[in-house]
Each structure stands twice: as C-alpha cells, then as structure tokens.
C-alpha cells in the first residue's frame, strides 16, 4: 500500500505540472494583458513595447511558463501585472473570508442534504418525497446569478424600502471582525449557495440509500426482526454514507476557490471574485496562483479520499 | 465497518485541518504591506477651532485601482482618484476653461511665460505651497517628476510628452523653466491631473534617489500628497478611506471623510445607492438613465456630455502603400488588405447614409445624447459648420449601384473590385456589452435594407482590444467593421490613431491605428503635423476644422453617438458642477452634505 | 413497452406472475417507472414542451423571432407581444420557441458527448487497471481540478475564434452552437468517468464476473454485456442531470458572451440580455426564459430519476 501511496504522490506532482501548463497556455490565449492599454491614444509604441518587455510578454510562451514555474517552485507566486502586489499576499488577504463563506455554506448544505436525502429515500414515492424532489430541483435549476440578484433586490433593497428589517447589500462598509456584522452579511450569500447545491447532494444520498436498502443483508436484518429505525441507522446508513462522504471529500478543495458569481453579486472580497476579475485581464500570475492553490488541494484530497475508500471497502483491491 | 468508517472520518477531518493550517493566518483586513496604514505625520494643526460635524460620504468604484499615482496606472479610476488627492499645475474647470491650480498664472504667449517659438515655457508656482506632511512644494518637485518620467530605471505607463522636454531650470523655489525640443501642443496635460490626464506631481523630498518607482509603496498608495484629501487607509479588495489634507493650499474641504467602496458592478452599486449605503456612483451607463430618473427625488441623476464618442470603423487596410517616412521606408501597409469596396469613399458614404443614427440615439440611448459628425464633440474644437449626414437608405442604394455593386438574387449586393469578385457579406465586431449588441442588431437591420449582409461578432473586451502579438482581430486587420468608443481630449491631437506610421503590421506590432488608414494623398499626415506644431489654440483651430471636414467628406468612419458620463448620487450629497473635460472630481473641496 | 406488454392487460400480468411466468426486464422497468408518479409527470411535461416547440416552429416563421422594432423595444406583455418585447423590439414569445429548439439541441448533444467520453474513459480505466488506469485517471483529475467555469471560458474563446455559420435544412445557425456543444461536453465528462470507474472496480471483483471469465468470455463481451449494463444506473442519473446541467451551462457561457451569438436565440442568451435590464423592472425578458428553463430541467430530472429507479435491478422493494 505504501508503494501505491508513493506512486500516487509522484503522479500528483505530474498532474500539477500538466494543470499549470495547460492553464497557463489557455489563460494567455484567452485574454491579452496588453488589452487594457489599447484605448490610450497618447501612448507611443515605445511605451507599449517597454511595458511588454517589462512584463516578459515578448518572450515565447514556453519560456514565460518556465520562468513562472521556476519561481513558483520556490514558493513565490510572482507579482500581479495589474495590481503590482505579490500574488501570495493577495491570496492571503482573501482566503479567510472565502473559507468562512464556503465553509458555512458547506456545513448547511451537508445538514440539509442529509435530512432531505434520508426522508426522501425512506418515504420513496410518497407525497413528501415528491415535494422534496420538486423543491430541491427548483433550487437546482435556477441560475445562481438570478437567485443572487433576486434575493438581493428583495431582501436588501425592497425590504428596506418597505420599512421591514432588511439585510445588507454587501456594498456597505463593514468590519469582518465583528461577528454580528459577519453573520448579517453571510445570510444572503450562504442561502443562495445552499439553495443551489443541496439538491445535488440530497439526490445522490437518496439514491445511495435506496440502493443499500435493496440489498440482501438489509432484507436479512429485517427478517431477523430488527426495527426499521435500527436497520436504517445501524446498517443502511453506514454503508450508504460512504459514497456520500467521498463526494463531499472531493468537493472540499473547491471551497478554496470561492464562488464566483455569489461573491460578485454580494461584493464579498473572496477568492472567486479575485480569480474572475484578474482572469478577465489575462493577469496570469494571479490566475495561476489561485489555480495552483486549488489544484494542489484537489490532488491532495483525491489521494486522501481514494486511500480512505480502499481502506473502508474491502472489496476493492489496489493493483 | 465501524472502526473503518471512523478512521475515514478522522482522516478527512485531519486533512482539512492540515489544509487550513497551511493557509496564512492573516485576515482580510490586513492592508497591503506598503505602509498605507500609517497616518502621515501632520505637522500643522488645522486653523479652525470648532470641531466639524461628522460628514462622511461613500463613493462606489466598480474597479479597484492598481496604483494611485496615475503615471503608473492605466485606469480611469486612478486618474479620478488623483483629482481627489492630487493637484495640477493648470487644469480644466467645469466650464472647460484652462485655469491655474497650483500655478500662479496660466502660461500664455501674452504674459510671456510661453516663448515666441513655443519651445520654452516658464512655470510659476503660487508661493508658500505645502505638501500634506508640511514640507514645502517647490519647483524641485516639478523637476523631479520630469526626471522620474524619463529615467530608464523607472517604468511609467507612458513617457509621451515628457520626453519632449530637454531640460528644466529651477532658478528659485516657485519657478521652473521647461525647455522643449519641439513644440508640444498638449503641454497643459503635463504635471496635471484629470479624467484623461496622468501627470500627478511627485514629492521629491520623499522619493529623491529612488528608482524602480513602479514597485514603490509611495506610488501604490501615496502618503504625501498635494490635493484636498489624503489616503488614510486602503483595505485591499474592499475599500479605501480618505480624510482632508490639513495643508491643502486651496479651499478647506467640507467633508470629514470619504469612503470609496469597491463593488463588482453597477448593479450592486445601484442597489447600494437605493439603500443609502453609497452616496455617489460615477460610472453608470447611458442605459441606466431611465432607472436613475425614476429614483428622484431620493436620488439624483446627472448626465454630462463628453468628447468621447462611439463610432463604427471600416477596415481601410491596404498592402500597396506609397507613403514613406523620414528614413525613406514605406509605411502604412497592413498585413492583409481590408474589404476592397471600402476603399471607395462612395461606398463608405452609402453605409453612413444607411444607418439610422437618430433612431439609435432616441431608442437605445433614450434621446439623452446626440449623434456627432466628427472627432471632437462637446468641445471647443468641434467644427460646427458640418451638418449631420441624414438617414437616407434610397440614396445609399443609389450610391452603391453607381459604384457597381448591384443587389443579387439572394438580396445581397455583389460586384467586382479591382478585378476580383466581391460580395457584401461582411463582419461587424464589438464587445459583449448589451448596449453594443443592441447597436449591432440595429445596424445589421439597417444595412440589410440596402442589400448588405452583416455578420455580428461579439468578443469580450480583453480579446477585442488585444494586441497584434496576441492575435487580436483589429490589429491584424481580420475584420471588416468594428464598433468602439474613442476620444481625444483634453488635447485634440489624434495622430496616434490615424497616422500612416502607426498602422499595425509585422514590422510595427504596437501601432495603434485600428482603422489601418494610410492616406495615400499624404494630406492627413500633413494636417496632423501642422496641428501639433503650434501650441496656440487660435492657430490650431482652423487646422483641426480642416481635419474634421476632410474626414467628414471622406466618410472615414461613422460616428454613432457622443458618450455621456452618467452619475447617480443621493439627495444628501451636495455635488458641485462637473463637465466632460473636468470629470466628476472637478472641485473636491466644494463637496458637502446637506443637513 | 413490447408488443406483448401492450396486448396483455395488467391483471393478467399478475396472474401470469403467480403461475411463475417471468417478465422481461423491459416490462419490469416500465412497471416500476409507472409507479413513480413524479417521473410520469416529468415525462408528460417534456412531451408538452416538445409539442409546444414543434407546433410553434411551424406556426411562427423564423423571421418572426428575429424582427427588430426599435420603437417598441422593452414593452411589456400585450396583445401584440404575448410575452413582451426585448431590447431591440424582438418578440419574446417567438424567441422562446426558437430558443427552445437550440437550447434542447445543445443540451442533448452535449450530454451524448459527455456520456460517451465519461463511460469510455472511466470504464476502460477500471477494466484494464495498471498504468492505463493511472494515466487516464491522472488526466481526469487534472481536468477536474481546473474550475469548470475557467475551462469553459478559455475553451470557448480558443475554439470559437472564427466559427463558420452552419446551414442545415435551409436555416442558418451560428457556428457557435457547435462550439458550445463541444465545450460543454468536454468539460463535464469527468464526474461520470470517476463514478463509472468506481462502479466497474467494485463489480469487477464480483462472482458473476469471475464466473463469466471462467466460462471463457472475452474482455469486450464482459465489458459490454456485463459491466456496463450494471453501471447503467449512475450513467442514466448523470445523463439526465447532465442535460439539465448543459442547459444551465449554456446560460452561463452566454452570460459571458461566449455562447451562441445573436440573432440566433437560446434561452440562455435571452437571460443574458435580460440581465442588463433587470434593475429597470423589465421582468418579462427574464421571467419567461426562466420559467421555461426551470420547467424543462425539472421535467427532465424527474423523468430521469424515475428511469433510474426503474432500471435498477436491486430496487425491487415496491413491486
């Protein structure tokens, strides 16, 4: 098993290399860092060439990539073309609030998914199952930008206009260290994220539980006279929860990346917004820095989840 | 099963803790390590003894500036901010007149500050000027700013103009004599700040001897400034706080604090304006006008016409240019030729006549602006003798017929151009902004009526404005028509965009002539050079009138509408007059709040 | 729904069962599907939608959807424009009909691509194991680690540079339709690949596979006749959620201007246009495409959910 682990770790590094190279090329090809200088009529060509040379953009793409890789391997993610700040610092400033937003959402999503998935599975085809199915699918089908914009319009703007207790738009000046202000500002973005994501998890859990409930050993347990609740929690759930935990585990590293649209609508200073604003400018040090962070986390968690899965399921043999 | 499940959960939890532990423990409220959180060392207490009431306002910015000092920033948002924290030598006021700011008098030929040949300009500063830290502001600061601009060890965005200065003498603290190598007509834009001007004065006593200023913390977030306000705090990604500069030479600012909040887009800004979280939003679009009007009287709307305009351009690229530059090399060739019929002025006129610009202004822009005829609308340079092209699709059709392009059986015009068959199935490219897509649709419908089939292409601005080396369509000439906004102010000189030498091609990838236009008669280049040869507006005006008439007769491009600045602000804000040249931050010390 | 099924009434099926006549898997599946009331509702919903689109396309000519009328832009629902008009005066009702065609077309084709890629990659990786598994899975992980929105943007830009217009059946489509299908398909196969691989890994070790091997079945036979049919459950679930996801993804890509170009309309790019006018109270531009998207996705998901329950040989609880 240890040799497998070692192999996986080495392969993990290879994946990171592939990812960074792929993303580097794609970023450079998708947006031109020089585009923002296009509309300044009083810049001379010498000025533009000077900027291009300074940013290293006049060299072949592969050379630029290896230069970036060289400093990244030493732990330095470079400097943003646009904001002239060290990328590591920019990420560090935004990471805590991202984790707060995404972590809170994830906790609520898991709780709701567990409840909804369980109820829907146990009461399959009943009215309650149908109701839960419908509601979770409606949330799932809504594009997040409308949900976010709509909820901001209603609960922040309209509620205040109608004199009701209202939630903040996010565009006000607030101190993240104040727990009450933090909680108030979390309500809307977290609600949107939960509404969208819960359905996916709860459906998966539901089908997982149903599959287990149809198994022979569950039938055996029932015929032995065990109560339904006992069967459910002691036998079925334990086994059904395994794939669910796998899915959750694989999603955790993406929390680092934040939620692009939600952060944008609610002016949340997180990683998603950072990534999007700088990707549009073709600012590849920032983009690659964020990507490297999330990719490393994903690779790491994938290895962890895979190892854990094989530990738990004795039927799987690793070659 | 039990123990294995628990083992799995423990592993997951531990992994999360490890990952969390890897994240640095700093919070989002840590300001960038640039010293922006240190309050400047004020050496003089304000003269007033009554404690001012708390007057704080919040402005919404949809983009966070990169550097505050505009010489090292490419953003309009920085240029605006420079008007709040910086001061100019001379500047344009809300009536578009050139006035003195830090200057004792505006240099003109009449008062002798501008020499007869225009090559020597004497800058006279007001006496007893101070920086915000109490140190004196002198001609040495002008000298230092120029030196830093031309120093190869610094990397400002543009050295344009400053390189024309050969030397600066500083006989005393309030006088600087600038020697130019050639007449530089836009000299008032040097050492001044404005919405389209990037010449903030740098404090020599702070920066003397330092190079590599583009990485300097004082350039990123200046602590020593000369304008009405100064920066107290900058929380990256979130907001900036400004407080009055106690040593400002001019009228004492009324507000006690200005917050600038960075929001992702104008939708959020509008919501915040409605709830009162934000008092002023400077960058609404023309399409937001009806929404903002509906908010009165709780919130107000102001629309300022600007000299910028949206226009439709033709790809006029040729591959057989005969124009030579001073070294005898041929200039003006594009890599690939544009759509052949566009070389015929009658074809361009036909398209100009076929587009119903009035309807576009009335419907898409709610009638809030006008369709101009040339490059400098809403400015003193505008040639008022030119009348608008009418909307006349019949005449357009006739012009195209006469030019030899008849409507085919599929409804699309075809013919031969330079011996090769051509079909009027052409592309129209612009950015993804909704208003532009609507313009595209309207123009597509207009041109269809005269037998021109238009394919619309929409690309994000990062790609649309990309450079030659990145393979963007405009510099490479891989387009037929395009739409975007341009503007030439405060100085009207458009040479960078129209001269033969600036056509982008393999030898000249950074050229900015998106029209790929090289006037084979040489007239355009001659007129441009004449216009830039004198700094006297009275001499230049007739030349620029001729330029406008020439471009109008040639129908070189189709101006669609003049852009407007649209501001939304709350009723409690006292917002002094503004203008297109001067911007919204025209007179920051006059900003106030009502009781 | 075989011929026999159609002619034998339900009562006789039960009678037939009681005397030991076995039902074909298809008949079993159909009976299970019918029991799932929400699935039947979903199927009815989809049929109604398809009917609406087909009849609508016949009644309304395509020019009806692309006609500009600037002086009547942004007008609300009325007798002239049943669903109102958009920002250039085009009729929203007509655009919903023609937009529906394209949206569904994109959804279905994208999922076909996605399922093919995912099943083949995941199945082959699990079946052969060893270094084949390692390479394919590392590639999958690399693709998974990159945020999908980023991949969508750069791929769409990279591929969509100069998409030629397609002429089918006398109608002109922007080539961007094909690009969008390609892009969505290429960025969503990874989850299915992982699931298929996990399932095949588990199944590979089961007794009946060993039995098949012992009986001399060769690899393709085992793969296609035994392993894949038993992973059909997750494939079907993923495919149906995939169609819904593809329609939503199309909305996101259109949101960024990289989707289908106007004047060709899709529900996604109609919502994108509506976004600029959201604040102005122009509700009809986004409410109607929204309703149709949610309705379609809901129906598809419900139906797919029923199919999953129906095809799972182990969920025989409720028969």
Image (cartoon, coloured by chain):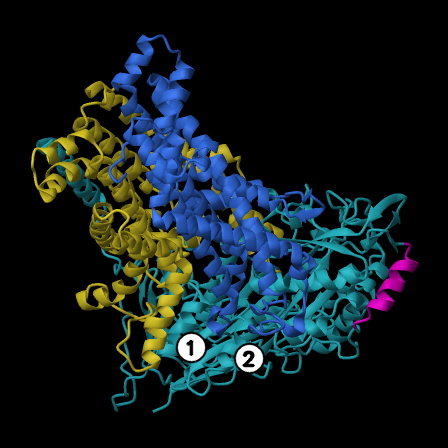
Q: Which is nearer the eye, A220 or A150? A: A220
At x 25% / y 90%, what residue is drawn?
Answer: B49
Question: Mark 2 — residue?
Answer: B303
- In whole angstroms, how far apart are the C-alphas of marks 2 and 1? 13 Å
Tell me the quarter of the picture where residue C118 sits.
top left
At x 50% / y 77%, what residue is drawn?
Answer: B291
Q: Which is nearer the eye, B125 or B50? A: B50
Q: Main secondary structure of the magenta part?
A: helix
Per the rendering, the mark at residue C98 is none
Query: Which chain did the renderer colour cyan?
Result: B
Identify the subunit bearing mark 1.
Answer: B
Dots 2, 1 in contact, CB < 8 A: no
Identify the subunit bearing mark 2.
Answer: B
Residue B12 appears left or right of B129: left
Q: Secondary structure at mark 1?
A: strand
* Picture colour for chain C: blue
Tell me the quarter of the picture where residue C201 sits.
top left
| Range of magenta residues | B391-404
The mark that comes first in sequence, 2 or 1, is 1
* Picture colour for chain A: yellow
Residue B125, given in percent of the width and then of the height, sits at 49, 77
In the image, is residue B399 part of the stretch drawn in magenta? yes
Number of callouts: 2
Residue B527 appears left or right of A199: right
Residue A237, given in percent of the width and then of the height, sits at 16, 40
Per the rendering, the mark at residue B280 is 1
Q: Quadrant of the N terminus of chain A?
A: top left
Q: Which is nearer the eye, B183 or B456? A: B456
Q: Secondary structure at mark 2?
A: strand
Q: Which is nearer the eye, A249 or B83? A: A249
A308 vs B312: above or below = above
Residue B560, given in percent of the width and then of the height, sits at 69, 68
């Amino acid at each position: 098993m240890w040799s497998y682990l070692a192999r996986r770790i080495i392969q993990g590094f290879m994946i990171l290399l592939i990812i960074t190279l792929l993303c580097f090329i794609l970023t450079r090809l998708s947006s031109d860092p020089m585009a923002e200088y296009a509309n300044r009529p009083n810049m001379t060509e010498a000025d533009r060439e000077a900027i291009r040379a300074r940013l290293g953009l006049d060299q072949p793409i592969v050379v630029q990539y290896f230069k970036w890789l060289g400093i990244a391997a030493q732990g330095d993610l470079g400097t943003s073309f646009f904001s002239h700040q060290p990328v590591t610092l920019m990420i560090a400033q935004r990471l805590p609030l991202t984790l707060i937003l995404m972590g809170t959402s994830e906790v609520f999503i898991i709780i709701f998914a567990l409840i909804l998935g369980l109820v829907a599975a146990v009461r399959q085809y009943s009215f309650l199952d149908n109701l839960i199915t419908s509601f979770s699918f409606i949330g799932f089908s809504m594009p997040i930008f409308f949900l976010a914009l709509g909820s901001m319009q209603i609960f922040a703007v309209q509620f205040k206009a109608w004199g009701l207790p209202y939630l903040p738009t996010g565009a006000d000046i607030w101190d993240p260290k104040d727990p009450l202000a933090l909680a108030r500002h979390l309500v809307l973005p977290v609600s949107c994220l939960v509404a969208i994501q819960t359905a996916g998890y709860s459906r998966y859990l539901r089908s997982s539980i149903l599959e287990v409930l149809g198994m022979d050993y569950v039938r055996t347990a029932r015929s032995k006279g065990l109560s339904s609740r006992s069967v459910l929690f002691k036998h079925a759930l334990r086994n059904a929860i395994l794939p669910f935990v796998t899915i959750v585990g694989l999603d955790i590293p993406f929390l680092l990346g934040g939620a692009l649209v939600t952060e944008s609508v609610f002016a949340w200073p997180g990683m998603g917004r950072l990534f999007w604003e700088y990707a549009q400018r073709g600012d590849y040090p920032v983009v690659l820095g964020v990507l490297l962070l999330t990719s490393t986390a994903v690779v790491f968690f994938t290895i962890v989840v895979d190892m854990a899965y094989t530990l738990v399921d004795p039927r799987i043999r690793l070659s | 099963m039990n123990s294995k499940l628990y083992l799995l959960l423990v592993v997951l939890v531990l992994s999360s803790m490890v990952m969390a532990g890897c994240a640095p423990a700093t919070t989002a409220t840590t300001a960038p390590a640039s010293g922006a959180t240190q309050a400047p060392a004020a050496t003089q207490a304000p003269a007033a003894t009554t404690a001012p009431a708390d007057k704080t306002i919040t402005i919404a910015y949809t983009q966070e500036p990169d550097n505050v000092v505009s010489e090292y920033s490419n953003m309009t948002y920085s240029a605006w901010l420079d008007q709040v924290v910086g001061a100019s030598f001379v500047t344009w006021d809300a009536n578009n007149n050139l006035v003195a700011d830090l200057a004792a008098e505006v240099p003109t030929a009449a008062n002798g500050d501008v020499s007869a040949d225009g090559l020597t300009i004497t800058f006279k500063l007001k006496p007893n000027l101070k920086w915000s830290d109490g140190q004196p502001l002198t001609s040495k600061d002008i000298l230092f700013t120029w030196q830093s601009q031309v120093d190869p060890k610094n990397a400002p965005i543009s050295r344009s103009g400053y390189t024309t200065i050969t030397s600066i003498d500083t006989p005393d603290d309030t006088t600087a004599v600038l020697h130019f190598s050639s007449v530089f007509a836009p000299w008032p834009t040097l050492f001044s700040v404005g919405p389209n001007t990037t010449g903030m004065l740098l404090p020599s006593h702070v920066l003397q001897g330092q190079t590599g200023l583009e990485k300097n913390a004082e350039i990123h977030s200046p602590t020593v400034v000369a304008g009405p306000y100064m920066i107290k705090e900058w929380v990256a990604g979130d907001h900036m706080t400004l407080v009055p500069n106690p040593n400002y030479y001019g009228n004492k600012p009324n507000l006690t604090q200005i917050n600038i909040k960075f929001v992702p887009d104008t939708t959020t800004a509008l919501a915040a304006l409605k709830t009162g979280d934000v008092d002023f939003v400077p960058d609404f679009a023309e399409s937001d006008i009806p929404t903002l009007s509906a908010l009165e009287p709780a919130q107000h709307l102001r629309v300022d016409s600007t000299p910028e305009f949206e226009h439709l351009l033709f790809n006029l690229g040729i591959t057989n240019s005969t124009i030579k530059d001073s070294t005898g090399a041929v200039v003006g060739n594009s890599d690939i030729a544009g759509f052949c019929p566009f070389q015929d002025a009658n074809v361009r006129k036909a398209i100009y006549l076929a587009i119903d610009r009035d309807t576009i202004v009335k419907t898409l822009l709610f009638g809030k602006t006008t369709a101009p005829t040339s490059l400098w609308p809403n400015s003193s340079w505008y040639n008022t003798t030119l009348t608008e092209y009418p909307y006349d699709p019949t005449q357009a059709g006739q012009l195209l017929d006469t030019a030899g392009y008849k409507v085919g059986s599929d409804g699309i015009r075809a013919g031969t151009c330079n011996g090769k068959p051509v079909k009027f199935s052409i592309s129209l490219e612009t950015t993804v902004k909704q208003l532009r897509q609507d313009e595209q649709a309207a123009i597509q419908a207009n041109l269809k009526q005269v037998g021109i089939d238009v394919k619309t292409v929409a690309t994000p601005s990062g790609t649309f404005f990309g450079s030659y080396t990145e393979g963007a369509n405009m510099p490479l000439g891989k387009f037929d028509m395009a739409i975007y906004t341009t503007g030439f102010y405060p100085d009207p000189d458009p040479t960078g965009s129209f001269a033969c030498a600036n056509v982008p091609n393999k030898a000249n990838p950074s050229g900015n002539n998106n029209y790929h236009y090289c006037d084979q008669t040489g007239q355009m280049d001659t007129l441009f050079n004449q216009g830039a040869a004198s700094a006297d507006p009275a001499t230049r005006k007739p030349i620029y009138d001729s330029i406008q008439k020439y471009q109008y007769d040639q129908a070189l491009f189709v101006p669609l509408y003049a852009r407007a600045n649209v501001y939304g602000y709350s009723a409690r804000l006292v917002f002094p007059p503004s203008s297109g040249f001067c911007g919204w931050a025209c007179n920051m010390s006059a900003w106030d709040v009502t009781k | 729904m075989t011929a026999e099924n159609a002619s034998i009434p339900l009562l006789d099926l039960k009678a037939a069962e009681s005397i030991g006549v076995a039902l074909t898997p298809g008949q079993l599946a159909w009976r299970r599907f019918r029991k799932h009331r929400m699935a039947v509702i979903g199927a009815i919903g989809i049929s109604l939608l398809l009917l609406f689109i087909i009849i609508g396309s016949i009644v309304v000519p395509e020019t009806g959807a692309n006609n500009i009328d600037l002086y009547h832009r942004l007008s609300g629902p009325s007798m002239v424009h049943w669903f109102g008009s958009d920002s250039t005066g085009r009729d929203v009702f007509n655009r919903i009909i023609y937009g529906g065609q394209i949206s569904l077309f994109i959804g279905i084709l994208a999922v076909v691509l996605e399922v093919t890629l995912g099943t083949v990659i995941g199945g082959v990786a699990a079946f052969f194991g060893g270094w084949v598994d390692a390479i394919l899975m590392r590639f999958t992980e690399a693709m998974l680690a990159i945020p999908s929105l980023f991949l969508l943007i750069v791929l769409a830009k990279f591929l969509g540079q100069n998409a030629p217009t397609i002429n089918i059946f006398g109608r002109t489509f922007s080539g961007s339709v094909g690009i969008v299908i390609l892009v969505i398909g290429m960025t969503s196969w990874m989850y299915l690949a992982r699931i298929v691989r996990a399932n095949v890994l588990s199944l590979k070790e089961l007794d009946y596979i060993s039995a098949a091997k012992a009986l001399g079945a060769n690899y393709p036979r085992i793969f296609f006749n035994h392993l894949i049919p038993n992973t059909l459950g997750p494939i079907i679930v993923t495919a149906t959620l995939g169609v819904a996801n593809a329609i939503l993804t199309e909305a996101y890509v259109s949101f960024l201007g990289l989707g289908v170009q106007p004047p060709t309309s899709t529900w996604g790019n109609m919502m994108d246009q509506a976004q600029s006018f959201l604040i102005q109270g122009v509700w009809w531009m986004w409410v109607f495409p929204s309703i149709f998207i949610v309705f379609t996705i809901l129906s598809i998901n419900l139906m797919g959910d029923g199919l999953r329950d129906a095809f799972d040989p182990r969920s025989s609880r409720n028969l």
